[in-house]
Amino acid sequence: MTDRVLVTGACGFVGSHLIEHLLKSDARVIATDLEEAKRTAYYVDRKDADTKLPEPRYYGNLLDEMDVRFIPADITDLDSLERVFQYEYDTVFHTASLYDYFAGWDRLYKVNVEGARNMGEIAAENGVDHFIHWSTLGVCGSSDTKSQPLTEETGYAPHNRYGRSKMKQEQALFEISDRQNLPVTVLRPAPIYGPRNRYGVYHLLYLYRKVGTGLVFPVYPRHHQPRFPSVHVSDVVRAALFARDNPAQTRGEIYHVTSDPIRQDELVTFIARSLGLPVKRVPLPWPIYKRIAGRLVKLAERLEQRARTNDKRPKFPASMAQYLESDFWFSNEKLKSAGFEYNYEDPKDGLWNYITWCKRRGML
């Protein structure tokens, strides 16, 4: 018999891609998310008229073209979730979160922590066989060593509000797993990009297109050069399906989902050339680079605070600026050792796919 699965956050970037992949496997899909009219209770929409500007998007219109049943619900409201759980599910894919670096702590905690707790408890009460949860590499923070990447065994050290909310989200679900025997698998994706993405990695592409030059800072000694993690949405979705298809191996486990690491100067050079921009290289000793990057991060924080005071979304969130200053080096060996194969293990291959998609739609 075909499995029935539930996808939360179905109108989001990842959720919509997940549903497309699930339908190829003949799964019976129930989709849930906020109705678009209720989305403004959690997101601060940009008041600019330019629709190319980076911000979280709602893809509910795509569900109209898919063979799914959509049941609107708010994961912070248990009564609305009762309607969703009128069905029995073999697998719950919990992608729903408030993914917004600009959001305040109260909103992040309500959606990401309390919402996940609601989902975990109702899934456990209804005997769900497998609860596959989307977290983030951001719960680990940045690398504190230049010799070893961060692994799934690394302790929590989130560097922003969003990462802190996802840490508490993980902890809530593992507590439910221990107390109510909910079979949980946690996926920790790197920043996700791919067709339809308009937030996160898109900020970088949009920024360099606006600046018009790829300003590259090779850092010396070379082991100080920061790395940037990323992953194509198709690999994130395929990792979730891999977890579903191998429950005996993946239940109770955490997996980092990221392409191989790429150094920041290599990434910027690749992006600039892919966009047809000139590249200007400015080699810097690590102490000088560290000082400049720190000042840029402080500037981004001040601009974001000014935007927050005016209730406006900043064009470049301070959390993205932190990638300038710190090294984000993560291992993907655990997932690969389990038997998963990436389509885009080299991030340049995946980014080229995404940049091409953006250019064809006039986004870059």
Image (spheres, rainbow, N blue to C red):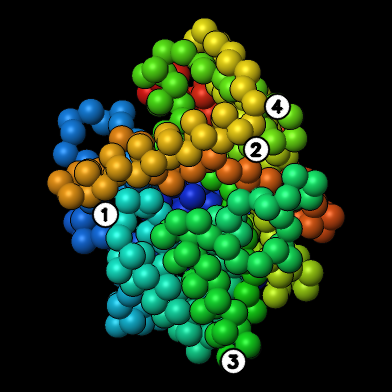
Task: Give me the disc on residue 220.
Answer: 4
Per the image, the residue denoted by label 2 is 227
Tell which tag, 2 or 4, sits nearer the viewer. 4
Q: Which residue occupies the foreground of this view, 303 or 6?
A: 303
Q: Residue at x 66, y 67 (%)?
A: 155
Whichever of callouts 3 and 4 sits on the residue coming sooner in the sequence is 3
Amino acid of disc 2 = Arg
Amino acid of disc 4 = Tyr
Q: Position of residue 159 (x, y in %)?
A: 50, 56
Q: CA distance from mark 1 to mark 2?
A: 30 Å
Amino acid of disc 1 = Tyr
Residue 10: in sight, yes or no? Answer: no
Q: Residues within 10 Å of mark 4 (few under 14, many from 20)?
A: some
Q: Residues within 10 Å of mark 3 (few under 14, many from 20)?
A: few
Q: Position of residue 12 (x, y in %)?
A: 40, 51
Per the image, the residue denoted by label 1 is 43
Question: Residue 142 vs residue 315: left or right?
Answer: right
Per the image, the residue denoted by label 3 is 179
